[in-house]
């Protein structure tokens, strides 16, 4: 098992180095993701170290929490005009997605519902498994959703808004006082473990976010994680996406991956409709709107927002609400529709 973990790390590192060498955008995200994806499709046995991957996600929670100020909290109140769009968008995704998976691709109701919901991957798989869904199919569909969104968005950001994807996502580690680094490590690890014990969804990100925000608001913390830490988080997030395709079969590619790709087209169209609505009524800047409403992975979109210097208040508030709506609504909808589900 250890050799699989080592092989995964080496393959991911090779991908990152290749992307760095050719000066490709987001090398620590795209490089490992592409190299691990190719290796997985070629049949290489890859393994991610789950506790380590979750620990890396705490860096993103700390990065977002460190941006929380009194002004941040005041600004959230003024976002109601776009925040109300989030439940509407989630409802439409379910309204279109469930029949798409159930009637067009022949999945059972539980698999269709939890594959359609743009929530946290682990949460959707947990709920879906409890409801009797096909965990492998849901995993591949969600991995495909995140993969496509996270590849398409940087292209859109660079082509349409000329976003600089090469700038460091933070200051160099050597420029941050050691006591500030220590506070961030404590906030990340303690926040994660406390949130995990109380059963908070997205514990590895939201727990550190809350504790770091408290430290920032109290004035104890006034720095964000260094660029090297954010790059490290990108690296392990990328590996996690690629590993989802290990042992994939031709039948799974023809059904699960294709179903996921088709659904991505639906999600992109819906996102563009909502973004155009926001832009038409001048409710928010278009780049922030795309990052806030895109139904990709929370961690991946936080990374992009950090890199392009987007308004973190706006982006994070919308993603937190989306995850909350999906997580809260999933068990309720499951109980309501379970008696009517068909195989």
Image (cartoon, rainbow, N blue to C red):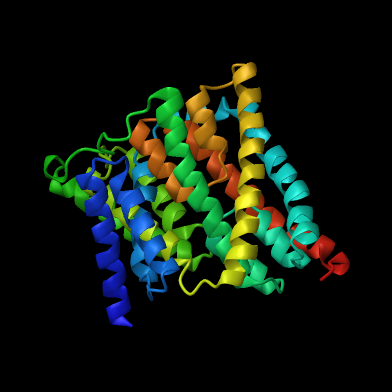
Position of residue 334 measured from the top left corner of the image (x, y, whole percent)? 76, 63
Question: Relative to residue 219, is residue 311 depicted above or below?
Answer: above
As drawn, 73 above or below 38: above
Q: Residue at x 57, y 24 (%)?
A: 78
Q: Residue at x 60, y 45 (%)?
A: 322
Q: Position of residue 75 (x, y in %)?
A: 50, 26
Viewer can see residue 59:
no
Query: Looking at the picture, how far across and down is residue 317, in whole percent?
Result: 52, 38
Q: Which corner quadrant holds the N terminus? A: bottom left
Quadrant assignment, res 308: top left
173 relative to 33, above or below: above
Residue at image point 20% right, 46% down: 21
Depth order, front residue of 334/261: 261
Q: What residue is shown at x 32% (from left), y 43% (from top)?
A: 26
State the residue in front, 22 or 138.
Answer: 22
Query: Is residue 171 left or right of 74 when viewed as pictured?
Result: left
């Amino acid at each position: 098992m250890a050799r699989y973990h080592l092989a995964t790390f080496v393959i991911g590192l090779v991908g990152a180095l290749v992307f760095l060498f050719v000066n490709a955008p987001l090398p620590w995200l795209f490089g490992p993701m592409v190299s691990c994806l190719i290796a997985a499709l070629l049949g290489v046995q890859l393994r991610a170290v789950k506790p380590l991957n979750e620990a890396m996600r705490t860096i993103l929670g700390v990065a977002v929490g460190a941006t929380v100020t009194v002004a941040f909290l005041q600004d959230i109140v003024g976002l109601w005009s776009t925040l109300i769009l989030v439940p509407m968008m989630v409802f439409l995704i379910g309204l279109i997605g469930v029949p798409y998976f159930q009637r067009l691709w022949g999945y059972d109701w539980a698999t269709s519902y939890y594959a359609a919901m743009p929530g946290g991957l682990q949460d959707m798989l947990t709920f879906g498994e409890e409801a009797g869904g096909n965990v492998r199919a849901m995993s591949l569909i969600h991995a495909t959703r995140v993969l496509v969104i996270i590849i398409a968005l940087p292209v859109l950001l660079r082509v349409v808004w000329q976003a600089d994807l090469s700038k460091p996502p933070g200051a160099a580690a050597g420029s941050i006082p050691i006591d500030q680094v220590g506070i961030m490590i404590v906030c990340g690890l303690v926040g994660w473990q406390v949130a995990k014990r109380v059963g908070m969804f997205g514990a590895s990100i939201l727990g550190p976010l809350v504790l770091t925000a408290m430290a920032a608001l109290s004035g104890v913390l006034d720095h964000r994680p260094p660029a090297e830490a954010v790059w490290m988080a990108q690296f392990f997030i990328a590996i996690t996406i690629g590993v989802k395709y290990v042992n994939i079969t031709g039948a799974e590619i023809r059904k699960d991956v294709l179903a996921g790709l088709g659904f991505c087209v639906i999600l992109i169209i819906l996102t563009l409709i909502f973004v155009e609505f926001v832009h038409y009524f001048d409710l928010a800047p278009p780049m922030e709107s795309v990052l806030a409403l895109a139904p990709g992975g929370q961690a991946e979109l936080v990374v992009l927002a950090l890199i392009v210097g987007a308004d973190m208040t706006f982006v994070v508030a919308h993603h937190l609400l989306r995850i909350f709506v999906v997580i809260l609504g999933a068990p309720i909808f499951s109980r309501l529709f379970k008696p009517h589900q068909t195989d």
